[in-house]
Image: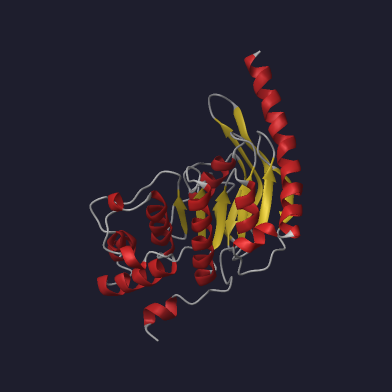
Amino acid sequence: MSAVLSSLEPRRAESGALSIRHVGKIYEGGGVVAIEDCSLEIAPGEICMIVGPSGCGKTTLLNANAGFHSISSGEIRLDGQLLCGPGKPQAEAGADRVVVFQNGALFPWKTLVDNVAYGPIVQGRMRRREALEKARHLMARAGLGGILDRYPGEVSSGMARRAEIVRALINDPRILLLDEPYRSMDALTKSVMHESLLALYDETDVTIFFITHDLEEAIFLGSRVYVMTTRPCRVKQVVDIDLPRPRDYRALSSETFRALLARTKEAVHEEALKAFEAGERERA
């Protein structure tokens, strides 16, 4: 087996434990409390799905993990190492935590396979031939094997988004941070994207921190779903997803799935009502 293919064997959760302890975030100037006493313990290899009302602080929490925002209190650790906390309010950005946002970020002048292979080559972690071999393998697993030499403008938004996620995973991050990556997609495209992501997850066993407003998406993909309160953000409820893996679309019709969806909807609806009422008071 080549060195490239050997490096693609599943880690089986040897790293990627994320510990968020009593984290708070107050935006300077406006005095807005975005996060308050928020604690999560995310196991290595877990797909952690974060749901909650719009504006509750979910993205602020993701950005703190990525190193884009500081925190005001508490601490965040990755595999026991301090990312941010007392004396170090903002984490350093690093290749161990890779973010995929809602908006696309592929280089339009590069083919999809060159986009995916770009990071390891520029960082000097792989020679071009090795990086391209690994890129082709991961792209095939994501259903992109037939469009390696296409440019981003020549493919659908779903295909381009899959290429972005593969580009993130080729760097072997410990945490993949996803901020509503499929928000603007129709239901059919989203279903294909879900199965593609799960195929890549089964390949790499990377820890995933995934923000979404789609509760079916959260339950279908997740190991656990964290329901967050309206602002300030903290954990309201944790829903363990006891659906077997590997998963496919048939899980959506199971009684277990429907029961989990009903339980999660109830918790989220309570917080959505609070957010609505708070908004009405602010406008009054």
Q: Nearer the viewer, residue 223 or 63?
A: 223
Can residue 223 be seen here? The reply is no
Q: Nearer the viewer, residue 270 or 90?
A: 270
Give the mark count.
0
| Point 43% across, 77% down: residue | 7
Q: What is the residue that sits farthest to the top in this orientation?
A: 284
Q: Position of residue 200 (x, y in %)?
A: 49, 66
Q: What is the residue that sits farthest to the bottom in this orientation?
A: 1
Left/right placement of residue 2 relative to residue 235 reads left
Q: Nearer the viewer, residue 175 or 102?
A: 102
Q: How is the image coloured?
A: secondary structure
| Point 60% across, 45% down: residue | 214
Left/right placement of residue 265 relative to residue 46 reads right
**Is 240 above or below relative to 86?**
below
Q: Nearer the viewer, residue 166 or 245?
A: 245
**Is 52 above or below relative to 9?**
above
User: Where, quadrant-wise, is the N terminus in this rendering?
Assistant: bottom left
Q: Position of residue 96 (x, y in %)?
A: 47, 60
| Point 26% across, 63% down: residue | 149
| Point 50% across, 71% down: residue | 203
Q: Position of residue 4 (x, y in %)?
A: 38, 78
Can residue 238 be seen here? The reply is yes
Q: Position of residue 228 (x, y in %)?
A: 68, 42
**Is 230 above or below relative to 78?**
above
Q: What is the residue that sits farthest to the left in this orientation?
A: 109
Which of the 4 quarters of the picture holds residue 279? top right
Left/right placement of residue 100 relative to residue 232 reads left
User: Where, quadrant-wise, is the C terminus in this rendering?
Assistant: top right
